[in-house]
Structures are given as structure tokens and as C-alpha cells.
Amino acid sequence: MSVIRVALPLPLRQHFDYLLSANQQVQIGCRLRVPFGKRELIGIAWQLDPADHYPLAQLKPVISVIDRQPVISDTLRQLLTFAAEYYHHPLGEVLTAALPALLREGKNLADYQQHAWQLTPAGAKASPADFKRSARQLEVWQALQQGPVPALELQASHPRTTVKQLADKNLIEQHLLPLTPYHQRGLKQPALQLTADQALAVTAINQAAERFQSLLLEGVTGSGKTEVYLQAIAPLLDAGKQVLVIVPEIGLTPQTLARFQSRFQAPVLCWHSNLTDTERLNCWQQTQAGSTAIVIGTRSALFLPFARLSLIIIDEEHDQSLKQQDGFRYHARDLAIKRAAIEQCPILLGSATPSLESLYNCQQQRFVHLSLQNRAGGQAMPRYQLVDLKQQVLQFGLASQTLQYIRQQLQQGMQVMLFLNRRGFAPALSCQECGWLTECHRCDAFTTYHKQSRQLVCHHCGAIKAVPRQCKECGSARLAPVGQGTEQLEENLQQLFPDVAITRLDRDTTRRKGALASALDSINQSGPRLILGTQMLAKGHHFPYVTLVVIVDVDGALYSSDFRAPEQLGQLLTQVAGRAGRGSNPGTVLLQTHYPEHVLLQDIIQNGYAAFARSALLERQHTRLPPYQHLALFRAEALQSNLCQQWLTELAAMAKTLPGLELLGPLSSPMEKRAGKFRWQLQLYSAQRPQLHQALATLLQAIQQWPLSRQLKWQLDVDPIDLS
């Protein structure tokens, strides 16, 4: 019998030792089924015969060894070990986050072998004339004319119903696909002519090949950053290497996937949470075998087991969605840099509005700074114009000047985009008699009125209620919506412009699979159209016919207790404005505000984001805030507010005895009550990163011994993005 140390998916900061019999052969990184209390858990073999193991008599035997080959490679072991240590998170949960759900459940990999679609003999004899009634079936048939296509790749670019219809006609069939390195090479479409700045960027990326180098590509909206990505990738695919492209939102995946698939012959796969468990495992297997050339995915794609990873690209590297906000709170951008260092490959961060952390790293010469200062097609940058809302009569939240601009653009056959970062019909319902407002009983927030579903929804905890018939305070039936959301704005625009097509993009309209791709397809058709939505509109979309962007209400973001609020507002305004004037016609951006003289608005409009960001960095330096200091945040949640305050007060007292720390708190969170629990926080700052992590390790060791720690829920967030 030998001893094996196993990492288990438990919120415990320790390993567990088990007995391994002589006939159980196992490698580090393989999955094991082990007993834990009355349960059986799937763990990862982490260390053989540790010197400090428990006495053999106290150990239970391993039930079974699931894998012959490791599911976590040596390079991923290095990355995940670093992540667990840096974010001070239990290793077992970190490992679990890196595996597809079916592997976490202990499924056998052999049961999920890859399949590919190919033409049957009848399909090979078919002709384009046989598909006159279905253009989609013709597209699938033409794709299979070139040879078998992996099922996951085919289903990523074509509707499943279309594939099934061809299979029912016995024109296509599935067969087992051996997992071998991809062999397709070359381009489907010729590369575009690069500008001088783009060519310099591609050259710099190519020169960094096969060694670790961090590069920041700062390019104005419409400057052709994606074309730089494509041309930097091309020589790597010719050499049989693999590339990872991380995008912040699922919404960006379809259009990015289509762009890459239309350029390269090599297989391109996507990875995001909307895939089924089987699709995710298939992508995982193909990546491990080197069968796919490019993976385009959201933040968790960072943990895929690439066989020959040669370049990592983080698109929209400033986006907050790259930070996991619950459980294992990692930042995909930062861990991607660490993975690139382990893999000894370059990493490219791209954005029109880089994060202050990345710009700081450029100043410190840790990153190579590449710049695209002009739009690729030579178009002018959009022109900003402030619309002062003071003493104006608004029609559906829009000033007369704004409506005049909208009418002019629509009459010219152009498209207009309206940005309102509030979904639903109205932020609340109010009693017209006593002023009572609909509030969430679990949060310090109002419930949003959704007219189409006739529901009141809390956008913080997800609580749903039916719309009341009368006021809870005075019994009056006179309830009216207060404020405006995207649903109400859409309804009002239909009244103002009954003959104009309207497309709304928010979480409510894009829930169904394929809804977002369909909406984007309609937007890309020429002709007058109104496009309205939330932050989803700011995520790097290319709308060639949009000539006017209206930011309906900019004031809500001007005043915030979060020191990152000015940076985030600057990024949001610049990104939304960047959707205008990307085609052949110039663009205009209207900002509706009651505070046109506000310093932040004037700075962004007059000087642009680049100058604003440099001045914001100087302000951070003077106030000793990140990135000039390092920050960790302890959060406490409990049903009683005093428990949180007491626990954090004890924590603060201990932290004050540790060297190199500055404390802010304990203090209640900006939203003190959420999901029925009171929330408090303690912020820890340090000029030296090692000192901060040493202090966190000391505090965590003490916390686990405190009886009070078992009476509440607490979390540690290293390098937090959200301070609410």
C-alpha cells in the first residue's frame, strides 16, 4: 500500500490522504473516486507518498482510478497551483473550476468520443439544385463537400435543426473522429491590406513568437484590432500551433467565431457557458489532442488543456466580465499572463480603452505598448455633442434636439443607436397617492417593473413578484412606473417612429439561443433602423450603418463611491460612442445630461480616453490607490448586521498588528442588504504585493480557528473589481 494525496472539490484549505493499493496505477493529475464521510467524491491525484502523510491506520483506500492519462497537465498544474496560492482559494475548488462538468462528475472520457459529419453516397451525388428551397441546407452540404467536419464545429456555425434535416434525408451521417492534430492549412479569404500602424503591430507580435512577452494593443474603435489578430495568427496556424482568443461576453462569441472561420481553413471552436456539457467536453478533448487550431471563448477557456499553445489574445482586456465575481474569484486577464509565462508564448491584450492596470504596466515597461491611432478605413472619429437637459421638456426621456437628430438620420436611410443601461420597463412602480415605491424585501433596492412579463424583478438577487393591484401602504390602485428602461423606450420609440424597424438588445431579448446572432444579422442589413439596448451594445460590435449614437442618460454613472467609477464611465462612453461612423458616413454622439460642465465629461470629450486615462493614473498615484497599491477585500454576510461588524472588527484588529498594511473599514457595503443578508467589508491595502499576501495567509490561518467564522459567510477577493 502507498499513500496518495488528493485534492477534493471542498471549501477546505487542505489536502486529503488515501491508501493506494499495489494494483492501482495512477499518475499525478488523474481523477480518483474516493470516500469522504458517507459520500463518494471525485478528486485529483496531487502528490504520491507525501512525507507528512497521516498514519496508515487512519487512512481510507481509494475506491477507483478513473483515468489512465492525466486530465490536468503539468503546465496546468503550475497555473492552478499559482492561482490557488495567489487568490488564497482552496486548491480542490480551483481544480474543479478548470474541468468540464462531465469530468467533475467522474464520467469516462471513452464514452464521449468525437464524431464528425460526412456526406453519404446519396449526399455525394446531390447537386445545388436539390437545395433550392433551403439555403441553410445548401450551406451545410457545401461545407461537407470539402470533407468530414467535426460535429462540434459544424453545429457551432449551423443550426442543429438544419443538420438533423439533412441526416433525416440520408444525405449526411456521423462517424467516429480520431483525435489527431489538425492538418488543414491556409486561408479561405485573402488578408486585408494593413495600415502602417497595423503592420508594425503584427510585426511586433510575430517577433515575440516562442517566448513570453506581454503586448498591449491600444487601438481606437474601428482601428482594425481584429485584423491584427488574424494576421498575427496566420503564420502560427501554418506551423500547426494553437491559439486561444478570450472574449469577455458570450455575445461577442458568434460574430468573432464567424470572422475567424471565414478567414482560416483550420478548425475553430468556441467555448462558453451556453454550450451543453457534451459540447464542452468535446471541445476540451479536441483542444487536448491538438485537433482544433483556435478556441474562442469566455474567461474559463483559460483552463483548456492546449497541446501546442503559441499565442493568447485577450480581446476587450479592460472588461469587468473577465473577473469572476463569485466562488473562485480569479481575473482571466491576469491568469492568462501567468499561463503565457508558463507556456513561454506571447500574450496580446487588445482594447480601445485599456485598463489603468495595463497602462501602468506599459509605463513600468512590463508590457510592450502597440498603438493604432486611426480607424482602418480612414473614417473620422465620431463627433461628441452634449445635450443639456436642464429646463427642457422631454418626450419619452428624449430632448427635442435629440429627436430632431434622430429624424434626420432615419430620413437619410441611416441607423441610430440609443444606449440606456437599464433593462425592464421602469426601475420601480410608485403610488400616485402616497409616494410608496415597490421595493425588494431581500435587498436595499427597488424592484424593476417588466411590463411584458407582468412581473417585478430584483436585478440584484433575482427575486420575482407579481405586479400588485394596489399600494401596500395606502391601498390606492393608482400605481405608475417611475423612470424608464429599455422596454419602455422601445414602446415609446414605436409610437414616435411607427414605420421604422426597431431592434432591442438586452438580457431579456437575447435569452433564447440564436436570438443575439439573429438580431445582429438584422442590424447589419442596410436601411433605417433604431437600435437600443444596454451595455451589450458596447462590446466591440461592428455596426456599419450606425451614424448617430444617443446616450440617453449619462448622469447615473457620474457619482459613485467606487474609485474605479470614472475609469469605467470613460471606458463605457468611449466604447458606446465607437459604434458610430464605422461605415462610409461620419458619426455623431449625443450625450444627454443635466451636468454638461462636469469635469469628467469635458475631459473625455475634449481630450479622448487616452489622455483621460493618463490623468486618471496620475490621480491614482497621488491618492495611493491601485495599481500603485495592491488591494484585497474581505466581505462578510449574515442575517444579523452586528455579526458582520463584529467579525470584521476582530479581523481589522489583527490586521493592524501586521506590517505594511493600510485598512479601510470595517464598513457596510454600498448596498448593505442583498438577498436577505447584511453585507460588510474590510479593504486591505499594501504597497508591496508579497507583504499583502503574507498578511492574508496569516489572517486566513487565524480565521479558520474563530468560532464566529462559522456563524456567517465570508469571502476574500484579491484584486477586486467590484467594491459594492
Image: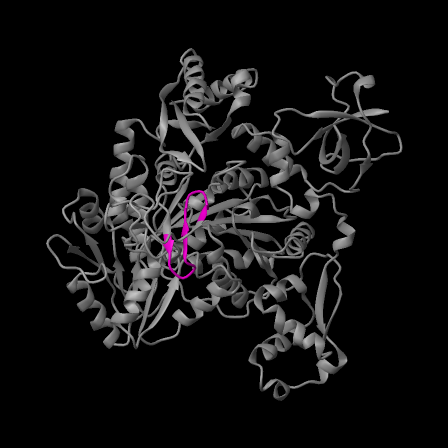
Asked if one can make out residue 623 in the rendered structure from this viewpoint, the answer is yes
Magenta span main SS:
loop
- Bounds of the magenta segment: 449-464
- The residue most toward the right is 23
Q: Is residue 401 left or right of residue 74?
A: left
Quadrant for the C terminus in the image:
top left
- The residue most toward the bottom is 129
Is residue 354 part of the magenta span, yes or no? no
- The residue most toward the front is 475
- The residue most toward the top is 657
Where residue 308 sits: x, y (%)? 63, 49
Where residue 680 sits: x, y (%)? 40, 27
Comparing 232 with 672, the one in front is: 672
Asked if one can make out residue 378 in the rendered structure from this viewpoint, the answer is no
Comparing 643 with 277, the one in front is: 643
Quadrant of the rendered image containing residue 460: top left
Residue at the (65%, 86%) spot, across then down? 127
Quadrant of the rendered image containing residue 380: bottom left
Where residue 539 sits: x, y (%)? 40, 55
Is residue 456 part of the magenta span, yes or no? yes
Q: Is residue 593 left or right of residue 141?
A: left
Comparing 718 with 634, the one in front is: 634
Where residue 691 sits: x, y (%)? 45, 19
Residue at the (71%, 25%) spot, across then down? 16
Instruction: Say if 88 sits above or below 445 in the image.
Output: above
Quadrant for the N terminus in the image:
top right
Q: How is the image coloured?
A: one colour
Q: Is residue 697 left or right of residue 178?
A: left
Query: How many marks do you count on the picture?
Result: 0
